[in-house]
Image (cartoon, grey):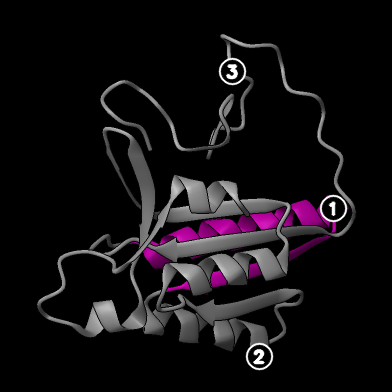
Amino acid sequence: LCDANDKFVALDPRWPVGRIIDPTSVPSRPPSTLALPVRMMALISAFGIKGQAKEWQMLRQTVLGARAAGLPIRLKVIVGETQLREAIDAEIAAGLADVEVAAIDNTPTAMVQTIQEWTPNILHCFCHGLSEPGAQWIELATAGDYLNPDAKSGSVRIDSAELEAI
């Protein structure tokens, strides 16, 4: 997510969200230390984009592969599409362990609080983002947005300052 000047939304000005590489223009970041199990949260809610179920499937396979290699991971998935949430619920009921699923909260404040309360080590976002001079944010669609025939985008916008506070 960047603006016309290639300015990225970032939790730290040197480390763009979603890039798991060292920036080339500044010193390398120190190695990360994670307490186990790794806590991963995924926000899957890109209004109007097909393939969100595929995003979930790829994420699930990656987590299962990491677990098979010996890395304990707890995963919380927050989704906008009701059908996808129900599908993940069914997988959990069938035995998918250490995974939780919930719906996108209706306000940015509630969504930020949900993220803060779960304290993820990794936050994976499959959503839209917008950027204009001086402001960048991610945009999440709620279940209501998907049901609204007049909706053109997700209604929950979390700006970079709110993300930075997490």
Instruction: Kindly identify which residue carries mark 1.
Output: 71
Instruction: Kindly identify which residue carries mark 2.
Output: 93
Q: Which of the two residues, 114 or 47, is positioned nearer the viewer here?
A: 114
- Which portion, as a residue range, is magenta? 51-79
Can see residue 75? no
Question: Residue at the spot x=38%, y=38% of the render?
Answer: 1
Q: Is residue 91 left or right of residue 135?
A: right
Q: Earlier in the sequence, mark 1 or mark 2?
A: 1
- In the image, is residue 145 above or below residue 132? below
Question: Residue at the spot x=26%, y=25% of the render?
Answer: 4
Q: CA distance from mark 1 to mark 2?
A: 23 Å
Q: Which residue type carries mark 3?
A: Pro
Question: Residue at the spot x=39%, y=64% of the render?
Answer: 52
Q: Which residue type carries mark 1?
A: Leu
Question: Could you say where residue 81 lies in the image, as x and y percent from the top left?
Answer: 37, 77
Q: Which of the two residues, 100 or 67, is positioned nearer the viewer here?
A: 100
Question: Could you say where residue 43 lies in the image, as x and y percent from the top left?
Answer: 50, 62
Instruction: Kindly identify which residue carries mark 3.
Output: 23
Classify mark 3: helix, strand or loop.
Answer: loop
